[in-house]
Amino acid sequence: MTLTTPSSVRTLSRGTPRDAYETSKFRKFRRCVKPAPPCPPFAAAEQHLQKAVQLEPENLAYIIALAQLQLAKKDTEAARRTLEPLLRFPNVEAQLRTRAEEMLQEISSPSAR
């Protein structure tokens, strides 16, 4: 007597047809989805920060954040133009003034170029 195994039993031992279907769907999905870019979208972030500075020029944290972003982009001249007016404001908090001065020194150092 020959013992045959029905296909449904063989399928269950390797996974159900539903599992195979879900796996193939996932593979198709993975092919369609593009991986995230390796770095943040600086252009959009810079536009938003510039708009924030326009809307609230008295919010010095926005100015610092914009300069930090410009430094991350290696745009030292834009960062300098952003930071220098900050040092001319009379009522800048000591912590923000110190951070701005540190960033300007970082820009001026030969290793930053």
Image (tube, rainbow, N blue to C red):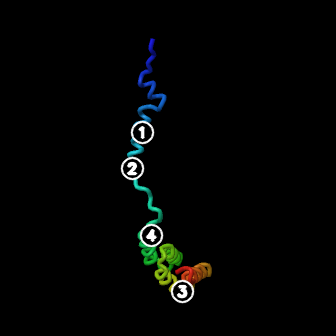
Q: Earlier in the sequence, mark 1 or mark 3?
A: 1
User: Observer-nearest residue: 50 or 2?
Assistant: 2
Mark 3 touches mark 4? (CB < 8 Å): no
> What amino acid type should be assigned to the residue bearing mark 2?
Arg
The number of callouts visible is 4
The percent position of residue 59, horizontal first and vertical second, equals 51, 77
Residue bearing mark 2: 31
Mark 1 touches mark 3? (CB < 8 Å): no
Is the residue marked by circle 3 packed among few (<14), some (14-19), or many (20+) residues within 10 Å?
A: few
Callout 2 secondary element: helix
User: Observer-nearest residue: 69 or 59?
Assistant: 69
Is 17 located above or below residue 94 in the figure?
A: above
Residue bearing mark 4: 42
| Of the two numbered discs 1 and 2 in the rendering, the one whose residue sits closer to the viewer | 2
> What amino acid type should be assigned to the residue bearing mark 1?
Glu
Callout 3 secondary element: loop
Is residue 59 in view from this perspective? no
The percent position of residue 92, horizontal first and vertical second, equals 57, 83
Q: Residue furthest top?
A: 1
Residue bearing mark 1: 22
Residue bearing mark 3: 89
Q: Earlier in the sequence, mark 3 or mark 4?
A: 4
Q: Earlier in the sequence, mark 1 or mark 2?
A: 1
